[in-house]
């Protein structure tokens, strides 16, 4: 509290840092492959699970593939389309986007979407009904 008796609120801002999304990668590697091999879940298996979850629970087709999962893990994309974020959280057993290292970076000078380039975002996470 300050002198006037008012409580000061502290606001912490997390600065965007380019680089790999270690939280997403760790969450994937912590899951076992559905193949029963005992190995960690592969990017392709993650993509298939995300696609299936989005279709079954949101009624939307998303086209996530191993390549796009790799881009998310490398930090090339930080904020996928909503059905993809929800499916990633559910498949990987997390309750928030932050637990997977997913956050909005719109307006940041390193954000390709802010420069008008969407790269593979539209294709990788497109939706159809």
Image (spheres, rainbow, N blue to C red):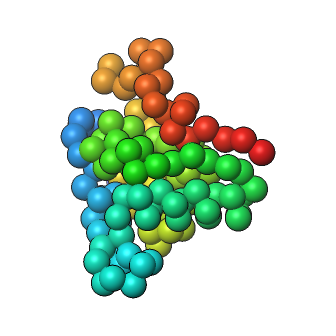
Residue 36, percent across and down? 39, 84
Residue 100, percent across and down? 38, 58
Residue 30, percent across and down? 31, 74
- Vertical placement of 82 versus 29: above or below? above
For image coordinates 27% across by 44% down, the residue present is 74
Quadrant of the image occupied by residue 39:
bottom left
Residue 29 in sight: yes
For image coordinates 75% across by 56% down, the residue present is 59
Counting the numbered discs, the total is 0
Residue 5 in sight: no
Residue 89, percent across and down? 50, 63
> Which residue of the protein is positioned furthest toward the top in this rendering?
115
Query: Seen in the image, is 9 located left or right of residue 125?
Result: left
* The C terminus lies in quadrant: top right
Viewer-nearest residue: 112 or 125: 125
Quadrant of the image occupied by residue 32:
bottom left
Query: Seen in the image, is 77 located left or right of residue 118?
Result: left
- Vertical placement of 41 versus 35: above or below? above
Viewer-nearest residue: 87 or 47: 47
């Amino acid at each position: 509290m300050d002198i006037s008796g008012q409580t000061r609120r502290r606001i912490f801002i997390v600065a965007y840092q380019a680089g790999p999304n270690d939280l997403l990668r760790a969450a994937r590697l912590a899951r076992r492959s559905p193949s029963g091999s005992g190995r960690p879940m592969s990017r392709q298996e993650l993509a298939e699970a995300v696609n299936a979850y989005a279709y079954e629970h949101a009624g939307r087709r998303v086209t996530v593939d191993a390549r796009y999962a790799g881009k998310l893990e490398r930090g090339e994309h930080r904020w996928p389309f909503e059905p993809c974020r929800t499916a990633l959280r559910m498949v990987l057993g997390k309750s928030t986007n932050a637990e997977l290292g997913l956050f909005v970076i719109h307006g940041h000078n390193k954000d390709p979407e802010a420069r008008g380039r969407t790269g593979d975002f539209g294709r990788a996470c497109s939706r159809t009904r």
